[in-house]
Image (cartoon, rainbow, N blue to C red):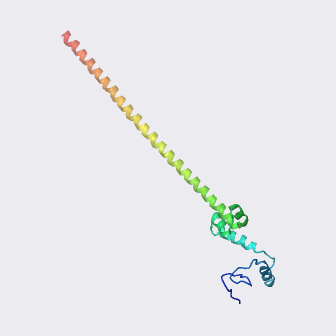
């Protein structure tokens, strides 16, 4: 096995301190020697890298910078989500939707309970007001009755 002389995996034959200009010929020769079918091009590796990076959780702006792209739109051309990734994404959305429904239902229940408490407090205030009013009316009736009795007694006293 050969060892690289310098910092590059594919150094220039003439200048080992510089990379080779293109690895296409070396790649094609390696593919032929390894009897790899169907043939693939080096850019397939960029697509694989981008797809696996997103699957591993790398966000698109970071991946875009890593690939040297000027826009996320270009990066999106390299990312090919697998069926399992799509299924997981759909499951996440479903979980989010269900959790949202649970939270909404919980909020509705809390609102109903709050309104019931307000209604109960209002009913208690109405009952208390009715008791006060009944007490007031009873007091007026009692006073009127006492006054009537007093007037009757005064009339009887004057007669006798």
> Residue 62 falls in which quadrant of the image?
bottom right
Q: Where is residue 140 drawn, in percent x and y?
A: 31, 23
Q: Is residue 138 above or below residue 33?
A: above
In this picture, residue 39 sits left or right of residue 125: right
- The residue under the point 25% across, 18% down is 149
**Percent x, y of residue 13:** 74, 84
**Horizontal and vertical percent position of residue 8:** 68, 81
Q: Quadrant of residue 158?
A: top left
Instruction: From the top left corner, tell me how far across and down residue 10 is, in percent.
Output: 71, 81
Above/below status of 136 relative to 107? above
Viewer-nearest residue: 41 or 124: 41
- At 47% from the left and 45% from the top, the residue drawn is 114
Q: Is residue 132 above or below residue 41?
A: above
Up the image or down, 147 lies above or below 61; here it is above
| The quarter of the displayed image where residue 19 is located | bottom right
Determine the residue located farthest toward the front in the rendered image.
15
Q: Quadrant of the C terminus?
A: top left
Viewport quadrant of the N terminus:
bottom right
């Amino acid at each position: 096995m050969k060892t690289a002389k310098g910092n590059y995996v594919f150094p220039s034959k003439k200048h080992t301190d510089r990379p080779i200009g293109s690895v296409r010929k070396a790649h094609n020769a390696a593919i032929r020697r390894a009897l790899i079918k169907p043939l693939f091009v080096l850019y397939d590796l960029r697509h694989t890298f981008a797809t696996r990076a997103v699957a591993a959780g790398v966000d698109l702006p970071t991946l875009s910078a890593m690939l040297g792209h000027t826009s996320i739109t270009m990066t999106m051309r390299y990312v090919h989500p697998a069926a399992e990734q799509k299924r997981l994404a759909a499951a996440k959305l479903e979980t989010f939707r269900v959790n949202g429904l649970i939270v909404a239902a919980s909020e509705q229940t809390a609102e109903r309970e709050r309104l019931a408490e307000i209604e109960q407090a209002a009913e208690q205030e109405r009952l208390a007001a009715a008791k006060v009013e009944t007490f007031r009316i009873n007091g007026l009736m009692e006073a009127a009755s006492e006054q009537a009795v007093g007037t009757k007694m005064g009339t009887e006293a004057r007669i006798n």
